């Protein structure tokens, strides 16, 4: 019986399934993450080199920086995505078990579990996000940009390890991931009984529900994501502390560039995390079911 599954075996299943889900998602969707970052670090309509659309950005990057430029900064998420998504799903299930044990089983408990999983995940991934953003904004050809390790070393050497170094933007990352995962898990699991009534739901129905969850979550926390890209990305030479705290950065962008600037990168972000959210849930559930069927 599932309830008799030893804790370690159940945890191992959640970690392996979550890791597989993350690796699959980032391998497929990373180019859209690069495009999203390029849009978010643009300094408004006065930038003569600004991108005008997803297609315009992708075409110019491939023409000027090489065909592999859309995979800039992929090594940090590849390295962290398996433990990151494993942490996400394992943390969610752990917090869910704790709240169930305490008798908290309502819709809000699922949102809280998701938010808790996001906070846990956000702290883990901040150094990798810092390096990823640094690499994604480089406009040189792939052969000319520094390696992931060289980039990490340069950040530590120049800015240190913590506040302005690899953990720059940790509060913003934690907030972004907490909001996203609270909405993502809360939406999926609260609406799953309404959308999926059969004992063996089809992949397409789960993909649709995951797509909706990922799209809504990505839209709701977009201003926080824009602020995160500005904080972790290159700073103006004349004001290296212009983008530092979450709310100050949001206010600065709003004041200088207008409210719509807080929605920069929405199209590539939704194109990535909408389908990406669908892929993650389906792969997680499929791998989890397979592991359970073979006795893990």
Image (cartoon, rainbow, N blue to C red):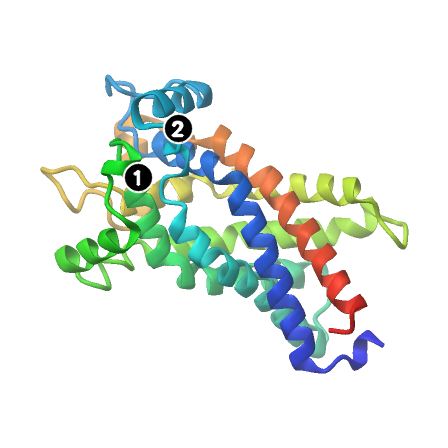
Category of crowding for the residue at label 2, using alpha-carbon neighbours closer than 10 angstroms: few (below 14), some (14–19), many (at least 20): some
Q: Could you tell me if residue 234 is visible in this image?
A: yes
Give the quadrant of residue 14.
bottom right
In the displayed structure, does residue 202 sit left or right of residue 185?
right
Q: Residue 251: which numbered mark, if any?
A: 1
Residues at marks 1 and 2, CA–CA distance in whole angstroms: 36 Å
Which numbered disc, 1 or 2, marks the residue closer to the eye?
Answer: 2
Dot 1: what SS? helix
Quarter containing the C terminus? bottom right
Q: Is residue 296 above or below residue 239?
A: below
Q: Is residue 47 above or below residue 26?
A: above
In the displayed structure, does residue 272 sit left or right of residue 106?
left
- Residue at position x 33%, y 58% in the image: 127
Dot 2: what SS? loop
Q: Position of residue 174 (x, y in %)?
A: 42, 57
Q: Position of residue 265 (x, y in %)?
A: 43, 31
Q: Could you tell me if residue 215 is visible in this image?
A: no
- Residue at position x 49%, y 60% in the image: 84
Sequence-wise first label, 1 or 2: 2
Tell which residue pokes out farthest to the right in this image: 198
- Residue at position x 60%, y 67% in the image: 15
Q: Which residue in the protein does label 2 denote?
A: 67
Q: Position of residue 251 (x, y in %)?
A: 30, 39
């Amino acid at each position: 019986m599932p309830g008799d599954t030893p804790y370690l075996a159940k945890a191992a299943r959640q970690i392996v399934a979550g890791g597989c889900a993350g690796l699959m998602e980032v391998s497929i969707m990373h180019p859209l993450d690069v495009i999203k970052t390029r849009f978010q670090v643009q300094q408004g309509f006065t930038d003569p080199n600004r991108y005008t659309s997803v297609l315009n950005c992708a075409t110019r990057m491939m023409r000027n920086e090489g065909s592999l430029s859309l995979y800039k900064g992929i090594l940090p998420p590849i390295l962290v995505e398996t433990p990151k998504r494993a942490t996400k799903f394992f943390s969610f299930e752990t917090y869910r078990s704790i709240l169930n044990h305490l008798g908290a089983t309502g819709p809000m408990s699922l949102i809280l579990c998701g938010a808790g999983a996001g906070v846990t995940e956000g702290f883990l991934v901040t150094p990798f996000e810092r390096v990823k953003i640094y690499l994604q904004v480089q406009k040189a050809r792939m052969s000319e940009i520094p390696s992931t390790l060289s980039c990490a070393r340069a950040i530590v050497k120049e800015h240190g390890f913590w506040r302005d170094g690899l953990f720059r933007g940790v509060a913003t990352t934690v907030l972004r991931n907490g909001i996203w995962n609270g909405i993502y898990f809360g939406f999926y699991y609260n609406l799953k009984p309404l959308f999926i009534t059969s004992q063996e739901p089809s992949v397409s129905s789960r993909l649709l529900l995951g797509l909706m969850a990922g799209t809504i979550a990505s839209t709701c926390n977009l201003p926080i994501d824009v602020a995160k890209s500005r904080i972790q990305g290159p700073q103006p030479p004349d004001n290296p502390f212009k983008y530092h705290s979450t709310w100050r950065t949001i206010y600065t962008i709003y004041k200088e560039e207008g409210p719509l600037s807080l929605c920069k990168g929405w199209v590539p972000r939704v194109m990535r995390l909408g389908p990406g959210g669908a892929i993650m849930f389906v792969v997680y559930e499929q791998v989890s079911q397979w592991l359970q069927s073979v006795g893990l």
